[in-house]
Amino acid sequence: MRKIVIAIDGYASTGKSSIAKLLSSHLNYIYVNSGSMYRAITFHAISKELIPLTKKNINTLISLLSDIQLDYRINNSTGFYDIYLNNTNLESKLKSLEVSNHVSSIAEIPQIRKHVVKIQKSFQHKGGLVMDGRDIGSVVFPNADLKLFLTASDDVRAKRRYDELINEGYEINYEDIFNNIISRDKKDSKRKDSPLIIPKDAVVIDNSKMNIIDQLNFIIKLIKTKFNF
Ligand code: DC
């Protein structure tokens, strides 16, 4: 059976990675979370004390890019790829509000996007790929076989992210999470380089009232219809 490339884009906290993981497991495909690369670079910038992102700090970060080795390695216990920066597994460190509050400013720097997109594109040859992010259907894989765009109401998204972080032991308040996702959407949609857009050939899924199994069933049906699987 032909292996396809599935691009999942959408607003912050619309459950892109949850459905991407489930879908990739169902199809026995590789799943790559593209946002984790921008988050890893943000984590690195914070550790190198390059925040606030003054012009000087941005230039320093750009000059460090050639020394930042980013790669994904399979985690045998989860079956998914974890992100490594200079051989350190950062997977569990990237969801903090501190990283979330700075990541959109890092992600709008064109030199950083160029560096990251090159690595993301290298996954295409593997075939059988699900990648989620903001510019996957528009820039990284404009010829993706299937493009999905997820959206949900602001409150539903904030509540989901809040519950997820509380379950993982983070100390956060709902208002901060709500403000973070709204301001990231705004910044991600307004940036000059590869803004978050709805690709014209994408299927838009508003999952405000759908659970994850409803979403999986909907997407599987779509794939069956479109590709005769
Ligand atoms: O998917 P995420 O919420 O972990 O992504 C974090 C940020 O990274 C998001 O607010 C914008 C940026 N991002 C991007 O610009 N392009 C992508 N393909 C993925 C993420």
Image (cartoon, rainbow, N blue to C red):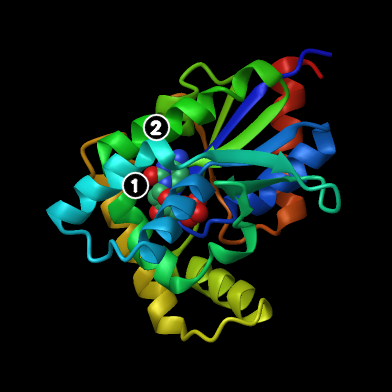
Disc 1 residue type (three-letter): Ala
x, y percentage for residue 158?
48, 71
**Viewer-proximal residue among 168 and 175:** 168
Looking at the rendered image, the disc whose residue lies closer to the viewer, 2 or 1, is 2
Near mark 2 (Cα within 10 A), the count class, few <14, some 14-19 or many ≥20, is: some
- In terms of image quadrants, where is residue 25? top right
Q: Which residue is mark 1?
A: 107
Give the residue displayed 78% in from the left and 48% down from the top. 75
Q: In the displayed structure, would residue 224 be above or below residue 38? A: above
Drawn side of residue 99 relative to residue 2, left or right: left
Give the residue displayed 61% in from the left and 25% down from the top. 123
Q: Is mark 1 within 8 Å of ligand 1?
A: yes
Q: In the displayed structure, would residue 138 be above or below residue 61? A: above
3D distance between C-alphas at marks 2 and 1: 11 Å
Give the residue displayed 77% in from the left and 53% down from the top. 213
Residue 225 in sight from this viewpoint: yes
Residue 115, label in figure: 2
Near mark 1 (Cα within 10 A), the count class, few <14, some 14-19 or many ≥20, is: many
